[in-house]
Image: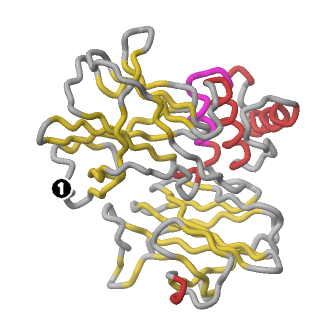
């Protein structure tokens, strides 16, 4: 599966800030949101608020007095290299895990800058203020939920494409096969925890395809490369949180798959053991760079702004392979 470049838009209009503030997700991704409150000379941030497709979550309760409200959103690591670009001009501090930062314009250890977008929420029928996360597809709630299910089915290895929020026999067959393989009742599809069940399923080892499992206490960033016989395409980065697994998206039937991964700390610096980077790769030199990337040109990496990185070949002859990353 190739992740499209989803564009986050914040639907808003002028409204007085006197009620609870909710963020509603009309995207096909399970997201984590962070808010920024800019009041006079102080700017505070808080996150992460997990929001499933077609659901809303209160992020501020009661009267909100602020000069500006700002918002940042990220997709779960299960979706691979972040498909949600941020175009905001306010660079504020966030942390990898749940956080509250009082002075969010000066980052400390364990914090990093992220782009926040100013929003002016609408006032809903219930009197609360609402900001919407949306894609170019402009899904309504029902379409966003179905597209979110389709996307996770594809990641889990089931043929539910295209991811369009439109129901049909193909989507229903893929969903039925998924439920049967996990021993789940069809009734769970309508439950509030269904997306959690799907994400958990995607983050467990599979008998088919490639699975990465992070057995370390560190965050692991991984990259994959595929050889289709004509060219080699390398792509990254995929975030794999501690004690979780991830199925990277692989399209077609490549002749060979390669993998590289490294452990990073809270400041996204490579973790070292006895002065050696904690990583898992091999001898095949392929191009990577620090930020999100995808390239099918593997020569002159340095001249093109990339780095040559040692990938390891993955033996997929049995149809499935689980690579476990552990501290030696």
Q: Secondary structure at mark 1?
A: loop
Q: Quadrant of residue 53?
A: top right
- How is the protein colored in the picture? secondary structure
Residue 41 is drawn in which quadrant? top left
Q: Residue at x 73, y 33 (%)?
A: 183
Residue 34 seen by the camera: no
| Residue lying at 38% horizontally and 48% vertically, measured from the top left | 88
Figure quadrant of residue 28: top right
Residue of label 1: 106
**Label 1 crowd (10 A; few <14 / some 14-19 / many >=20):** some
Taking the view exactly as shown, the residue that stands out farthest to the right is 169
| Residue 61 image offset from top left, x and y in percent | 28, 20
In the image, 37 versus 61, the foreground residue is: 37
Seen in the picture, residue 79 relative to 12 is either above or below; the reply is below
Instruction: State whether residue 190 appears in this view.
Output: yes
Asked if residue 177 lies left or right of residue 246, the reply is right
| Residue at the image point whose x is 74% and y is 60% from the top | 209
**Residue 151: % across, % down:** 68, 43
The foreground one among 18 and 309 is: 18
Name the residue: 50% across, 34% down: 133
Identify the image quadrant of the N terminus.
bottom right
Is 147 drawn above or below residue 265 in the view shown?
A: above
Magenta region includes residue 185: no
Q: Which residues are magenta?
A: 189-200
Magenta stretch: dominant SS? helix
- Provide residue 290's location: percent of width, then percent of height: 45, 72
Question: Residue reaching furthest left?
Answer: 41
Instruction: State which quarter of the image contains the C terminus.
Output: bottom left
């Amino acid at each position: 599966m190739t992740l499209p470049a989803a564009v986050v838009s914040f639907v808003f209009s002028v409204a007085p800030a006197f009620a609870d503030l909710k963020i509603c997700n009309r995207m096909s991704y399970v997201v984590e949101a962070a808010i920024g409150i800019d009041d006079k000379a102080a700017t505070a941030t808080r996150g992460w608020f997990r929001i499933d497709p077609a659901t809303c979550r209160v992020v501020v309760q009661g009267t909100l007095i602020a000069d500006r409200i700002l918002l940042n959103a990220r997709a779960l690591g299960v979706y691979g290299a972040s498909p949600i670009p941020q175009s905001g001009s306010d660079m504020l501090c966030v942390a990898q895990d749940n956080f509250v930062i009082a002075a969010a314009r000066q980052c400390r250890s364990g914090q990093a800058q992220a782009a926040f977008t100013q929003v002016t929420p609408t006032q809903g029928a219930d009197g609360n203020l609402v900001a919407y996360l949306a894609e170019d597809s402009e899904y309504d709630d029902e379409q966003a939920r179905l597209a979110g299910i389709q996307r996770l089915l594809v990641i889990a290895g089931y043929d539910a494409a295209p991811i369009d929020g439109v129901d049909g026999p193909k989507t229903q067959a893929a969903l039925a096969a998924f439920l049967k393989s996990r021993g789940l009742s069809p009734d769970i599809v309508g439950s509030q925890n269904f997306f959690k069940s799907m994400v958990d399923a995607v983050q467990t080892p599979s008998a088919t395809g490639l699975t990465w499992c992070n057995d370390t206490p560190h965050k692991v960033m991984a990259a994959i490369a595929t050889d289709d016989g004509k060219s080699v395409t390398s792509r990254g980065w995929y975030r794999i949180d501690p004690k979780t697994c991830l199925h990277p998206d692989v399209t077609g039937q490549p002749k060979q798959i390669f993998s590289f991964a490294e452990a990073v700390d809270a400041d996204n610096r490579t973790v070292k053991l006895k002065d050696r980077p904690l990583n898992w790769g091999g001898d095949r030199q392929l191009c990577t760079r620090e930020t999100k990337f995808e390239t099918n040109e593997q020569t002159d990496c340095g001249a093109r702004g990339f780095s040559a990185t040692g990938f390891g070949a993955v033996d997929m002859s049995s149809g499935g392979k689980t690579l476990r990353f552990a501290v030696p």
